[in-house]
Image (spheres, grey):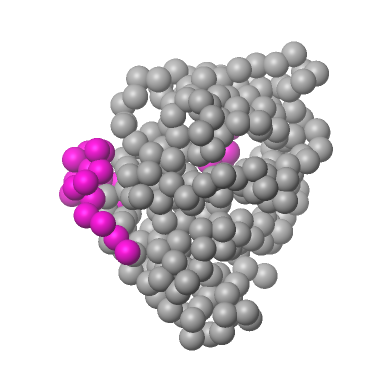
Amino acid sequence: MLTLPLTRRKLLKGGVAAACGCFFPWAAIAGPNSYYTQNSRRLLGEFDGVCLGVEQYLAPTAGREQAGAVAGLARETFARLLPNLPEVGGESNRNQINVLQAGWLAAIFTGMKAQGFSARDAGRLFYDLCESDLKATPAEKLLAEGEAYFSAENYAYLRTWAQWTRKRTYPGDWVATVVFGNGEDFDVGHDYSECGAVKYFQARDMAVIAPYFCLADFSLSRSQNTGLARSMTIAQGDPICDFRYKRGRRVTQDWDTETPRFTL
């Protein structure tokens, strides 16, 4: 069973073909002491693990040679992208993992596009790798993380984090507002009025890949029993991304329900 080295669930634990980076508005923030420079060996090693998954996923249908070519170009691309990924403050920011994964998907899409694959193909590969990782994780661990999401400690953290995002310290970051429900429609949620992943993909002329990026949120919520529902995403042209969580609610959204609405 394939296991990826990083997934979105890590942020709950913390909080419960390349273009020149100089064209990006946040590139000046990155520098010799940036999070990416300081951790480059580890981050490149983790993406090597992702690329092994890419090869395993593609080889049965595309053949070993083409799968290897995709993974090889993805590795080269990510190595060039890494130093100029948007700075968001390192692992103290719950969205640092999302910045890294946006870089992963950009690199994977570059590798796949060069071999004739579509954005949908790249999005499906990314989605399936995330699903495989969740299946390889002990269920009790995921459920414990999900339960912790509804704790008073995490609610306090979310309030503080959302207030901080509205200071817009880092131009490439997300901007959020936390909302609390009545326990019937939902328990807790957050609205993103700015999405760092969408900013990144748009800056790289990859907006076509953006709608696929967050589909694994539903897989994670299903595994953690956190009952995510979402009706809008910035990637699809909506004004916000509206995440709503309700403990124990069945997650009904997934690849099959969401991708028919994609217009890019």
Camera-side residue: 231 or 82? Answer: 231
- Is residue 130 shown in magenta? no
Camera-side residue: 181 or 146? Answer: 181
Q: Compared to 135, does 116 lie above or below?
A: below
Q: Compared to 156, does 215 lie above or below?
A: below
Residue 164 lies left or right of residue 85; in this view the side is right
**Res. 261 visible in picture:** yes
Residue 83 lies left or right of residue 59; in this view the side is left
- Give the quarter of the figure containing the N terminus: bottom right
**Res. 51 visible in picture:** no
The residue sitting at 49% across, 81% down in the picture is 66
**Location of residue 128 (image quadrant):** bottom right
Residue placed furthest toward the front: 263
**Location of residue 167 (image quadrant):** top left
Camera-side residue: 49 or 92? Answer: 49
x, y percentage for residue 177? 52, 20
Camera-side residue: 26 or 142? Answer: 26
Residues in magenta, as a range = 9-38
Number of numbered discs on residues? 0
Residue 88 lies left or right of residue 224; in this view the side is left
Residue 192 lies left or right of residue 248; in this view the side is left
The residue sitting at 51% across, 34% down in the picture is 237
x, y percentage for residue 5? 52, 60
The residue sitting at 40% across, 20% down in the picture is 166
- Is residue 28 shown in magenta? yes
x, y percentage for residue 26? 26, 38
**Location of residue 73 (image quadrant):** bottom left
The residue sitting at 56% across, 63% down in the picture is 121
x, y percentage for residue 245? 69, 29
